[in-house]
Amino acid sequence: MQNFLVLALSESGGFDPLSIDGGGGVLWTWIIFGISLPFIWKVVMGPITSALGERDAQALAAIESAERASHEAEKVRAEVEVKLGEAQAGAAKLLSEARERAEKREHEIIELAKKETDALRERARVDIETAKDQALVAIRDQVVELSLGAAGQVLKRRVDSEDDRRLVSELVGSTKAGGA
């Protein structure tokens, strides 16, 4: 009977909703689309929509995470710069203290060297005075010997008694006191 109805409508030249040749194709497309839309929405569009939503959420989370990491990196950079400045200040302080200690030690060494130089000079002066006194005593002894020898030759006798030595020694000693 359906065949008859389809055949009758197609022979009459009217609208045949079952015919694909006319406007029936559009109608059936809309009907099939309307019937399959809930199924498509549930089976196809639902997972796609939720996947896109999850992707957007992950992208937002990644952006927020990157911003937090950027802020943390900026904080760490600032802390590192502060610590670097503190380290440079500490190094400058240590260098200054070392320089002060070196200057103090330098002054101590110079003072010690001056004291040692003064002590050496004084010791040298004392040694020179001692050597001078010993040389003068030796010269006096030689002068006494020479004087006794000369007196012996002048007197044509041997002059070497203790009394003669004492007399010449006093004479040489008085000459030194009078001349100096």
Image (tube, rainbow, N blue to C red):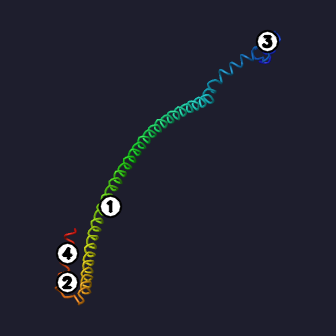
**Alpha carbon of mark 3 to alpha carbon of mark 1: how far?**
136 Å
Circle 1: is it few (<14), some (14-19), or many (20+) Cα within 10 Å?
A: few
**N-terminal label among 1 and 2:** 1
For marks 2 and 4, give the CA distance: 12 Å
In the figure, residue 133 lies in which quadrant?
Answer: bottom left
**Residue 36 in the image: x percent, y percent?**
65, 24
- Identify residue for label 1: 113
Badge 4 element: helix
Number of other residues with Cα within 10 Å of mark 3, as a class: few under 14, some 14 to 19, many 20 or more:
some
Is residue 2 positioned above or below 81 on the image? Answer: above
Q: Amino acid at mark 4?
A: Gly
Residue beneath label 4, please? Answer: 173
Q: CA distance from mark 1 to mark 4?
A: 42 Å
Q: Are marks 3 and 1 in contact (CB under 8 Å)?
A: no
Q: Nearer the viewer, mark 3 or mark 1?
A: 1
51 and 80: which is toward the camera: 80
Q: Quick one: SS at disc 2? A: helix
Name the residue carrying label 3.
9
Image x and y of residue 27, in percent: 71, 16
What is the x, y in percent for residue 79?
Answer: 42, 40
Q: Badge 2 local density, few (<14 within 10 Å), some, or many (20+)?
A: some
Ranked by sequence position, the earlier of labels 3 and 2 is 3
Q: Is residue 74 left or right of residue 47?
A: left
At mark 3, the secondary structure is helix
Return the residue at label 2: 165
Q: Residue at x 28, y 75 (%)?
A: 135
60 displayed left or right of 32: left
